[in-house]
Image (cartoon, grey):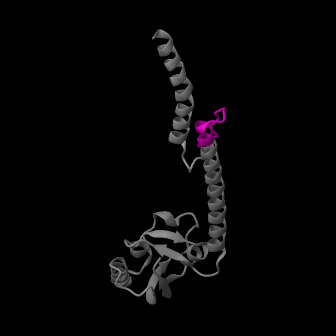
Amino acid sequence: AILVTVAGVGLGRRLAGPIQKLHQAIQGFDPADEASLTPVVVSGNDEIATLASTINALAQRIKERTSNLRETKEQLNAYIQTAQITLLALDFDGRITLLNSSGCALIGIAPDSWASLNWLNDVVDPADQPLLRHWLNEAAASRLPPEGALEYRVRTNQRGIRFMRWHLSLL
């Protein structure tokens, strides 16, 4: 009985060790942190080793796809920033979620200073704010066509007030 118990404990540890390694590796995976995607090393040719190999292959695919997404995002950002037209994205409260360098030049701000601005309150002329507020409310309620145009005045730092025509698209 003692021999069976000792053999059972030994076998249990032999199986539990690789399973614990797999568990720790999976729990530590964070696709945003490539360093967390380290290979799981389990020796042998059993099901656990095969599972570890599969997990390693998945981790490698996650690294590759994360890297591809990062490169695509950088390329897209480069295209947006070099566009010769103003590209502006707002949330439904009028906060700027994207403004390219052409848009920054239009209103006369540094390219890295737009994140704290609310387009509706800080840039749109007060007389036209109700017009844009109405459009944002309608967009939030899905009561607008997906594309259209809107004309209103914006306040700029160097050129005063400018009347602009905006081509609108819901994203």
Residue 154 is situated, as x and y percent measured from the top left of the image, at: 46, 81
Residue 24 is situated, as x and y percent measured from the top left of the image, at: 53, 35
The reply, left or right, for residue 129 in relation to residue 29 is: left
Is residue 151 rendered magenta in the image?
no
1 up-or-down from 95: above or below: above
Residue 6 is situated, as x and y percent measured from the top left of the image, at: 50, 14
Q: Relative to the observer, which residue lies in front, 1 or 45?
A: 1
Of all residues, the one furthest to the top in this rendering is 2
Total labels: the figure holds 0
* Image quarter of the N terminus: top left
Residue, x 51% and y 37% (percent of image)?
A: 23
Look at the image and give the residue range highlighted in magenta. Answer: 36-52
Report whether residue 157 is seen. no
Residue, x 55% and y 70% (percent of image)?
A: 109
84 up-or-down from 44: above or below: below
The reply, left or right, for residue 162 in relation to residue 44 is: left
79 up-or-down from 37: above or below: below
Report whether residue 61 is seen. yes
Residue, x 59% and y 42% (percent of image)?
A: 51
Q: Relative to the observer, which residue lies in front, 53 or 9?
A: 9
